[in-house]
Image (cartoon, rainbow, N blue to C red):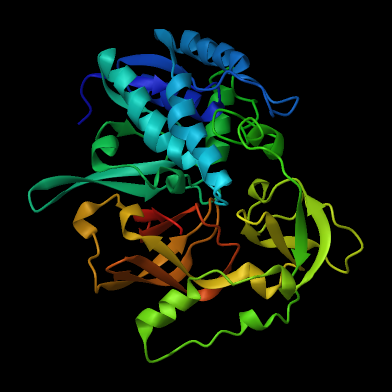
């Protein structure tokens, strides 16, 4: 039972607008809140709407719903807790997910605090996911469920939320298809009905990533080395009689060296690239497109392979260190020695992949039924029990 005031997070987009409208129709006491999380324009691409445009639309929606409206500036916290982490991860040759961090560190932490300070008991957002509260051994547990629209399900972006954070969260549009949300917005005359969905980094927008990262990461010349599909390192000896050793080998990146291939180009910094990337290599004359298959930031070398079926793009397993494992449902936590069959997702909108989770003393190994393309260190793997996201972790 929802009691008390609800802070509706209005982003200036159609999803949060309809979420607020639905709650208003149900008679709840609403406060519209807009977050300013990023004020700078360095590296942002022309044509991307800055926050000044978003706040205008958010204010128009609040006026249409006849609810009070406030703006909270969380830009300092966003820089410290999301963007600075992003710079550091790229510096180390990893690929972070700022959207996941933004939800954990800002939307469902700093923003919730701001809402509670203003007398709200809950915070509603326009995420395409659902929440269900159940009782387990006398304790309330909040289940994070996938959105009904399979093409818009955003549960992956919330994979790092805690039970405490879910307790105050409301997801009013999780049961709707995107087309229904657009229809409702149009029929009710919401100003955001025809606004395009935001893209790019959460609250920053579309960016020229190298230019954006050069705010803190210096460009430095390096070489791109093409690794042939016949590289002998792809044929690793896998001990079938030792599961632990097998998992460790399968989850370890391939050991490339410059001598294993040929120099085919130059770049301005290995830390500007990510595994699986195609654009930005600027190497021509190949039979098939080049894809990044490995990054060595210490020696500033980018390794690439021809074609999207190159064996260097695929791995059968990944590893998550123990300190990076997070349980949305702590009552379902796996312990060392446990194994479990669960579908797993390693990126947003990826179809769930069948896998086996093995909890070892050092962390979690995930062994997929089918090799996975472009497993990038720094990204999040999330596992599901049916349509419930139960846990996640940062890929090593």
Residue depicted at 23% across the width and 37% down the height: 164
- Does residue 21 appear in this view? yes
Q: Position of residue 27 (x, y in %)?
A: 31, 18
Of 147 and 35, nearer the camera is 35
231 w.r.t. 226: above or below: below
- Does residue 206 appear in this view? no
Residue depicted at 29% across the width and 73% down the height: 339
| Image quarter of residue 166 | top left
Total label count?
Answer: 0
Residue at the far right in the pictured view: 285
Could you tell whether 64 is left or right of 358 in the image?
Answer: right
Of 216 and 34, nearer the camera is 216
339 w.r.t. 304: above or below: below
Could you tell whether 353 is left or right of 362 in the image?
Answer: right
Of 33 and 149, nearer the camera is 33
Q: Position of residue 237 (x, y in %)?
A: 52, 88
Residue depicted at 63% across the width and 53% down the height: 274
| Image quarter of residue 185 | top right
Could you tell whether 83 is left or right of 44 in the image?
Answer: left
Q: Position of residue 133 (x, y in %)?
A: 22, 44
Q: Quadrant of the N terminus?
A: top left
| Image quarter of residue 344 | bottom left
Q: Position of residue 310 (x, y in %)?
A: 71, 72
Residue depicted at 38% across the width and 33% down the height: 105
Residue at the far bottom in the pictured view: 241
């Amino acid at each position: 039972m929802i009691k008390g005031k609800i802070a509706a997070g209005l982003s200036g987009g159609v999803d949060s607008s309809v979420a607020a409208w639905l709650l208003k129709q149900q008679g709840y006491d609403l406060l519209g809140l807009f977050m300013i999380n990023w004020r700078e324009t360095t590296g942002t691409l022309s044509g991307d709407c800055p926050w000044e445009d978003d706040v205008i639309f958010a204010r128009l929606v609040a006026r249409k719903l006849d609810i009070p409206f406030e703006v909270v500036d969380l830009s300092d916290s966003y820089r410290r807790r999301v963007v600075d982490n992003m710079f550091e991860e790229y510096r180390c040759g990893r690929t972070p997910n700022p959207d996941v961090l933004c939800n954990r560190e800002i939307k469902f932490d700093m923003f919730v605090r701001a809402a509670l300070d203003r007398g709200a008991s809950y915070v509603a957002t326009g995420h395409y996911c659902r929440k269900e509260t159940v009782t387990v051994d006398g304790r309330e547990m909040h289940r994070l469920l996938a959105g009904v629209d399979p093409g818009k399900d955003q549960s992956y972006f919330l994979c790092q939320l805690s039970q405490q954070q879910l307790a105050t969260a409301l997801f009013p549009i999780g049961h709707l298809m995107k087309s229904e949300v657009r229809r409702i917005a149009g029929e009710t005359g919401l100003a955001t009905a025809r606004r395009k969905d935001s893209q790019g980094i959460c609250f920053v927008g579309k960016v020229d990533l190298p230019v954006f990262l050069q705010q803190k990461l210096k460009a430095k010349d390096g070489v791109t080395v093409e690794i042939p599909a016949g590289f002998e390192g792809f044929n690793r000896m896998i001990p079938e009689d030792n599961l632990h050793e097998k998992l460790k080998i399968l989850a370890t990146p391939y050991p490339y060296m410059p001598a294993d291939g040929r120099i085919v180009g130059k770049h301005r910094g290995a830390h500007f690239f990510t595994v699986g990337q195609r654009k930005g290599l600027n190497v021509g004359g190949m039979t098939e497109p080049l894809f990044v298959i490995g990054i060595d930031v210490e020696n500033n070398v980018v390794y690439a392979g021809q074609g999207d079926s190159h064996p260097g793009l695929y791995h059968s397993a990944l590893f998550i260190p123990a300190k990076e494992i997070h349980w949305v449902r702590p009552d379902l936590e796996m312990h060392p020695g446990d194994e479990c069959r669960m579908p797993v997702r390693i990126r947003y909108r990826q179809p769930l992949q069948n896998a086996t989770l093995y909890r070892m003393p050092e962390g979690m190994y995930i062994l997929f039924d089918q090799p996975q393309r472009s497993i990038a260190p720094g990204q999040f793997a999330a596992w599901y029990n049916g349509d419930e996201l139960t846990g996640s972790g940062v890929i090593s």
